């Protein structure tokens, strides 16, 4: 009778221990979390860039359509949609034959649009801190006045309330109050991170 057992060796082959498995899983989870954070940041940056570019385009188109008469009083979501000038970055709540009553930005937040004689406003709310400061900087070259933070509102083409980032009350040499913007956009509550640009 032959012995069929394998000879014993100095090092026995063994399976993966629970500790080793948990270590590999923890490393994989850390890498996945880092990848998600990078994707999330890149996605937010892309939406912010789209929002800025779309808003600059929208301002130019509004001036083309309403600017000749200098009267923006009829500017509202329905008339924006009717005119066909709304950039693709923005969405309306149009439902069938019912015209739009609101316009939404790249993040899905409603944009407040008001007009008056000689001026109109675009109001953005629930912005991230980064989006708030980036959008304000983007709009600074186009806006007569930019109000930011809690209490910033738009009515009949005028921006009021909140803190003034750009406008006649700003006394800095650059014409921009960066400290006021940083404070307004740094609010811990997203509902208070509001930006209202008055365009003339």
Image (tube, grey):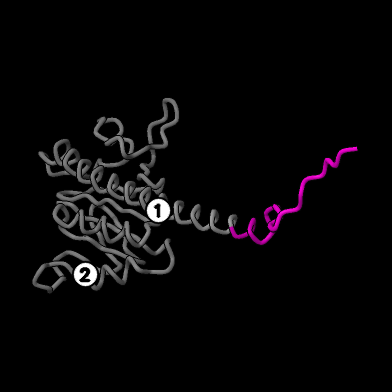
Q: How far from the left and from the top, in percent, is residue 12? A: 71, 55
Residue at image mark 2: 178
The residue located at (8%, 72%) in the rendering is 173
Q: How far from the left and from the top, in percent, is residue 42? A: 35, 50
Q: How far from the left and from the top, in percent, is residue 62? A: 19, 40
Q: Is residue 133 above or below residue 68?
A: below
Q: Is residue 148 above or below residue 35?
A: below
Q: Residue furthest front?
A: 1
Horizontal arrangement in the rendering, residue 73 relative to residue 108 (left or right): left
Q: Give neighbour class at mark 2: few <14, some 14-19, many 20+ (Cα, 10 Å).
A: some
What element does badge 2 sit on?
A: helix
What element does badge 1 sit on?
A: helix
Q: Is residue 100 above or below residue 96?
A: below
Task: Name the dominant secondary structure of the magenta segment.
Answer: loop
Residue 98 on the magenta span: no
Horizontal arrangement in the rendering, residue 44 relative to residue 176 (left or right): right
The residue located at (32%, 47%) in the rendering is 46
Q: Give neighbour class at mark 1: few <14, some 14-19, many 20+ (Cα, 10 Å).
A: few
Residue at image mark 1: 38
Please report contact status of discs 1 and 2: CB closer than 8 Å, yes or no.
no
Quadrant where the N terminus is found in the figure:
top right
* Magenta span of residues: 1-23
Label for residue 120? Answer: none
As measured in the structure, the alpha-carbon distance from the residue carrying label 1 to the one carrying label 2 is 27 Å
Q: How far from the left and from the top, in percent, is residue 155? A: 29, 55
């Amino acid at each position: 009778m032959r012995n069929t057992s394998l000879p014993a060796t100095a090092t026995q082959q063994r399976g993966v221990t629970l500790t080793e498995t948990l270590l590999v899983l923890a490393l994989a989870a850390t890498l996945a979390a880092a990848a998600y954070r990078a994707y999330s940041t890149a996605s937010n940056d892309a939406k912010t860039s789209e929002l800025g570019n779309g808003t600059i385009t929208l301002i130019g188109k509004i001036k083309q359509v309403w600017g000749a008469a200098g009267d923006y009083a009829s500017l509202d979501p329905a008339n924006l949609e009717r005119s066909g000038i709304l950039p693709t970055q923005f969405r309306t709540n149009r439902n069938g034959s019912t015209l739009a009553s609101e316009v939404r930005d790249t993040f899905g937040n409603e944009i407040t649009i008001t007009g008056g004689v000689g001026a109109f406003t675009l109001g953005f709310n629930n912005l991230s801190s980064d989006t708030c400061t980036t959008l304000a900087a983007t709009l600074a070259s186009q806006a007569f006045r930019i109000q930011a933070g809690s209490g910033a509102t738009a009515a009949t083409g005028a921006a009021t309330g909140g803190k003034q980032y750009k406008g006649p009350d700003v006394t800095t040499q650059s014409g921009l109050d960066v400290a006021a913007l940083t404070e307004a956009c740094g609010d811990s509550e997203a509902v208070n991170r509001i930006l209202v640009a008055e365009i003339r």
